[in-house]
Image (tube, rainbow, N blue to C red):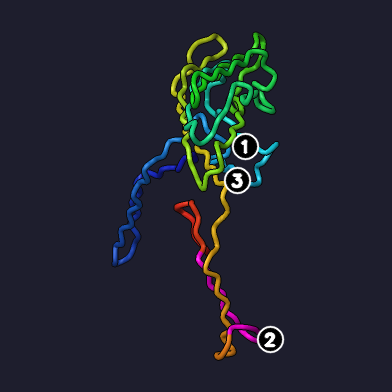
Amino acid sequence: MAGMHSHPKISILLGGSLGLLLIFAAATPVLAQNITCVPDPQMISLADVTGGLYKDTVVVHYAGDGAVYGYSIDLTWDPDVITAVASDFAKPAGGAFASTQWFIPRVITAGHAIIDASLAGGSTGTTDDDLFRVTFTAVGTPDHATTNLDLTVLSFRDQNNNPLGGITADDGQVIVDLVVPSVTAVLIENTTLAHTDDYLKNTDAIRVTATVTDGDPGFALG
């Protein structure tokens, strides 16, 4: 979640007989999170088919002031919307944790996993890197279903195995939409020829109307 810069309240008195006073109110700061899901939200659509299953990947990323050498992260999701087993969790494609030998994802129950990882001695920690990735598979073929990805930091460690404080997580989201919009009641009208809609010819103007519905509550045409 991107942070918004705050500005102190500033009063500027302009010269002249009007003596105009301009006041800029301070914006409420929004703190950036150290751990985020990328992308957020992740969409699983009909284009994301692999071997007859619909799936896509979410990357969990860290960016902070303290270099991390090891972590333990708790992740939960709605198992009625998406699934993942231990083998669906993987090291990141690049960065400090890509080559670590100590990477242990554990699926505790359906919809709940704990991911542990640590860098080997002599490694260099990181302040801005992907931590892990997970590939989720859609359950069934829903017409727009959503689940939060709830991240909880259990432990973050520095090079001396001391805890790193102030680590916060921004929960992600996965949207599964595997049903195309429904188009019904299609009507084609010839607005040039008032007596018929059965045919049209060059230069005729037509109007097409239809009822389009979708399971996405935010669906709109435009």
Residue on which disc 3 sits: 45
Q: Are marks 3 and 1 in contact (CB under 8 Å)?
A: no
Q: What type is the residue that disc 3 sits on?
A: Ser
Image quarter of residue 193: bottom right
Which region is colored magenta?
Answer: 197-211
Identify which residue is drawn at 49% across, 43% down: 145
Q: Are marks 2 and 1 in contact (CB under 8 Å)?
A: no
Image quarter of residue 125: top right
Give the answer, above or below, for where 74 lies relative to 171.
above
Residue on which disc 1 sits: 56
Q: Main secondary structure of the magenta part?
A: loop
Residue furthest to the front in view is 198
Q: Nearer the viewer, residue 153 or 54?
A: 54
Q: Tag 3 or tag 2, which sits nearer the N-term?
A: 3
Image quarter of residue 197: bottom right
**Mark 2 residue element:** loop
Mark 2 and mark 3: Cα distance apart in space: 39 Å
